Image (tube, grey):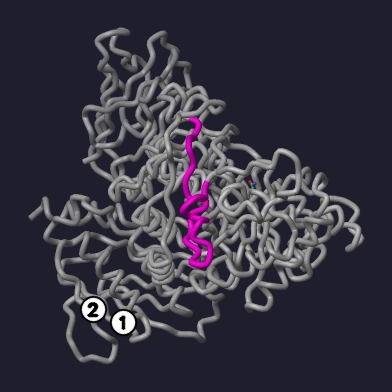
Amino acid sequence: MRKALLATALLSSLAAAEPTIIPLPKEMKVAEGTFQVVPETGIRHDAALDGIAKLFAAEIKERTGSDTKTVREELRIMLPSEIRLDLDSSLPLKPGGYKLEVTPKGVLVTGKDIAGAWYGTRSILQMLPPKGAESWRAPAGAPMPLVSINDEPRFGWRGMHLDVGRHFFPVEDIKTFIDSLAFHKLNTFHWHLTEDQGWRIEIKKYPKLTEVGGFRDSSPPYGNRNSDDGKSYGGFYTQEQIKDIVAYAAARQITIVPEIDMPGHMAAAIAAYPELGNSDIPGYAPKVQTRWGVHYYTLAPTEETFRFVDDVLTELCALFPSQYIHIGGDEAPKDQWEKSPRVRELMKKEKMKDGHDVQSYFIKRVEKMLDKKGRKLVGWDEIREGGLSPKATVMSWRGEQGGIASAKEGHDVVMASNSHLYFDHYQRPAAEELAKGLAFEAIGGFRPVSSVYSYDPVPKALSPAEAKHILGVQGQLWTEYMKDFYKVEYMAFPRIAALAEIAWTPVERKDYNGFRTRLDGIMKHYDAAGIRHGMPLDPPKRETKDGSTVQTSLGIYQEHWPEFAYDGKPETFFWADRALKAGDHLTLTFRVAVSGKAKVVTGGAASRNGDKLASGVLEASADGSKWSEIAGFNDGTAEGSVPAGTTSLRIRVTKPQENWLIVHEIVVE
Ligand code: ACM
């Protein structure tokens, strides 16, 4: 009985630590106690949330192992334990906003709209123990902290991009990726479907795009980017597969923005239909490219090409309901146009002075096509070259300048800067990654998760009115150095978590330390769900046994973290990395006040004379500033009575010693 009480007390104290939610909600209050999700817990929901309730029930079932009932709100069917999903469009929140109330009796999510209700369920999943955790098997059920959340996204475009041109990932991988985006409340998947090295979307009117353009003869192997593996490589998505993926994403409140990259990055399409390129130049010999980098082949700005583009966009729009269609526009070399007699003639006729004007002419023609189809054009910031088309939205990737200039001109902008948001860059120093093997090669750069987190999508150069044009923010995954989905996830996570927080959480609430602590919890979800991830460069936060915190004036020897002095595990300990000075300390601050008997054991290493504390005191404090001695150290051990109301215990060194210090465990009973 006493054991059971203790276990409950421990659970509730654990639950009151800051819940593991990324992105951090706009407003959140946490109370002592838990709601227990048990096998009998069912979902009662608004009829408009049928789809979400079913998906969520399947996720709960995965964890509890029992059939999770879903019941429409109006049905008078009793559920012994309930999670309710409701809608209220009058909530004073932005689209995607929601309220979440967890009490010991039940859980209530109220979405401003369907997306909001979905995001409420994402917060619930993150607060529950990871899939397969021991607590799911306990008869009492899995604990959820008691919270009151009022939440809404900062930006409407919370995007993640994936290049499937350089490497192709099967349908199941794309769905897994979409699940992971949804877990982080991202809402836009920018699907980069065409490249010099491969065309990946079936277009019925132009079958050779995939038959020819979908395959290349060779690729550079890891470890030697200027060489060829000599292996045929390719693949593409059929229109049926695309429809399936679009529906899968929509059910998870994710819009897919497809990209057909033009007029550059088109070598695969031009290899399939050579008449689309600048075929009137000397040495014209298009092929699906087998090396990375920017290639020379661009579409010719001819009527025949524009008919092709229009046809492709017609099929694309039939597959993708997205308001935005991405037409690329990046890295289109102007050399072929300058050499082509046909293009030079066009330039004369249209009074274009250079290649930039041709680029602008091209993009403006495409914008008119999309306009007729009722869609909006978005393109990389090179679409500014030669003048931006009137209604274009700009994706700023070459730093922020293109985004700043476009917003000042009144254009909408998505920030996708390669200064912080290119997840094909290394997360840890290159030498360290490469030491793990050639397959850990990245294109270059260095972008740890902390740096992604530091990014604010609203550039300082913008006035509040101009800043309204920032639709949001997006991370990029270019896949030259990601031959399989394992590597995609390894590069994407956990940086996507940082992206999600800068895309969602109010900037005033940003707090890297809090994020870093929550990230450890989120990475446990990744591990349980089989999502591969890199490790942040800064050390993972270690845990004390109940959410208390430990600080020390001493350095840390190897991986013997201060938290190990109070983790309830005899096999771990804190180990200082130097001789001690008078005044050095290790201070434990409890989450809730304690009293009883304290015992602190120092030393333990057979080497280094045991590294015991020779001269020191154990002190207690109720406020963290006034301290009273409760015991001295005798042969490395201190035992004393802890007065009621104690919130901190401190081990204080009173005389210098040559030996270092091991604190094995602090026990309060
Ligand atoms: C890009 O990285 N070429 C948009």
Can you tell which mark lies on residue 45? 1
Residue 333 occupies quadrant? top right
Q: Is mark 2 within 8 Å of ligand 1?
A: no
Q: Report the residue marked by disc 2.
A: 70
- From this viewpoint, is residue 457 visible? no
Which segment did they paint magenta?
198-220
- Residue sitting at x 77%, y 50%: 401
- Residue sitting at x 28%, y 32%: 666
| Mark 1 touches mark 2? (CB < 8 Å) | yes
| Residue type, mark 2 in image | Thr
Residue 555 spot, x, y in % from top left? 46, 22
- From this viewpoint, is residue 366 visible? yes
Can you tell which mark lies on residue 36? none
Any magenta on residue 209?
yes
Quadrant of the drawing holding the C terminus: top left
Dot 2, crowdedness within 10 Å: few (<14), some or many (≥20)? many
Residue 440 spot, x, y in % from top left? 45, 30
Quadrant of the drawing holding the N terminus: bottom left
| Residue type, mark 1 in image | His
Q: How many marks?
A: 2
Find numbered disc 1 in the image and state the secondary structure of the residue it sits on. Answer: strand
Residue 611 spot, x, y in % from top left? 32, 14
Residue 281 occupies quadrant? top right
Residue 55 occupies quadrant? bottom left
Any magenta on residue 108?
no
Q: Taking 477 as reference, is 541 left or right?
A: left
Mark 1–mark 2 Cα distance, whole angstroms, equals 7 Å
Residue toward you, 166 or 53? 166
